[in-house]
Amino acid sequence: MAPVPEGHTIHRLATRHAELFAGDRVRAASPQGRFAEGAARLSGTVLEDTEAYGKHLLHHYAGELILHVHLGLYGKFTDGPGEPPPPVGQVRLRLASDRHWLDLRGPTACELLTPPEVAALRDRLGPDPLRADADPDRAYARISRSPTPLAALLLDQSVVAGTGLIFVTEALFRAGLPPLLPGRELTPARWRELWADLVALMTRAVEVGRIDTVRDAHLPEVTGRAPRVDRHGGEVYVYRRPGQPCHVCADEVRRGTLTGRNLYWCPTCQR
Ligand SMILES: [Zn+2]
């Protein structure tokens, strides 16, 4: 199963959708019918701007109409130039201009929100490392008071928004922090480093469209090891590498579970 899209994917979609439609009057429809009413309200309005907040995608249309999409596990966008093809499968939302079309299938959320509802959504989310307006102190206020394991806190979208299992397990490895460290034992200095690393890793993932976390010194072309074979691409240290040797110390990468999620770590590098 493909992992849940992490924040960089949603930020890339926001940019892509602005490139396709910003400034254009769009035609909207719900071939599947489940968003027929919302699509009717959107149709004929101009897409002014798009943004991502964590794993949430927002389209801002003229007249304070705001489309909110959360892809969840199964949601997927497809797009193309020119006239849209006949709809295939369960197309929840189709947007089209004279230049492009866009289809959305299988999202967890596809709805119109009012500005106060968007404000409430943002209040429920922690700071997003990919946003210039993010305040990491807000996240640390939660982390520094909590006995909860650091990995669980970082996966909680109300603490940090946009981080999923890959960014969290990899950033903890790079920081040398055990995933089960209680949040309240993380010092302010270590938090600042961890936040800065999340910003760097996620920004790079937005640029290249995949998650690469391995430092130059540990890349296959430097160490002579075989490159990672994984359909999601990207060189990583511990994510989905249980039982394999750590790229840094050669100890065996471990897997555990935490609140139903897999965790991966190196017991030597992260203690
Ligand atoms: Zn190691």
Image: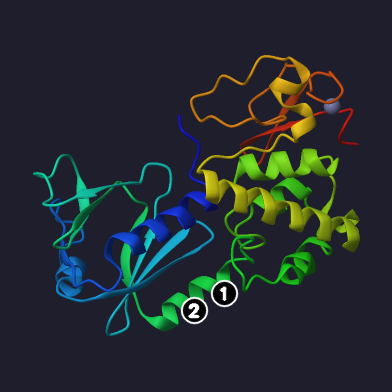
Q: Amino acid at mark 2?
A: Ala
Q: Are marks 1 and 2 in contact (CB under 8 Å)?
A: yes
Q: Quadrant of residue 171?
A: top right
Q: What residue did someone put label 2 on?
A: 119
Instruction: Say whether mark 2 is within 8 Å of ligand 1.
Output: no
Give the structural element (helix, strand or loop) at label 1.
helix
Residue 121: image location, x then y, percent: 49, 71
Image side of residue 61 versus residue 120, left or right: left
Q: Quadrant of ligand 1?
A: top right
182 or 64, which is in the foreground? Answer: 64
88 or 205, which is in the foreground? Answer: 205
Up-down: is 227 above or below 271? Answer: above
Up-down: is 19 above or below 226? Answer: below
Residue 181: image location, x then y, percent: 85, 46
- Quadrant for the N terminus in the image: top left
Up-down: is 45 above or below 245? Answer: below
Residue 16 numbered tag: none
Q: Amino acid at mark 1?
A: Asp
Q: What residue did someone put label 1 on?
A: 123
Instruction: Identify the residue at horizontal 27%, vertical 65% (top origin).
Output: 21
Residue 18: image location, x then y, percent: 35, 64
CA separation in Å, label 1 and label 2 = 6 Å
Instruction: Identify the residue at horizontal 61%, vertical 48% (top origin).
Output: 204
Up-down: is 188 above or below 168? Answer: below
Q: How many marks?
A: 2
Instruction: Identify the residue at horizontal 68%, vertical 45% (top origin).
Output: 168
- Quadrant for the C terminus in the image: top right
Instruction: Identify the residue at horizontal 11%, vertical 44% (top origin).
Output: 85
* Residue 180 makes an appearance in the image: no
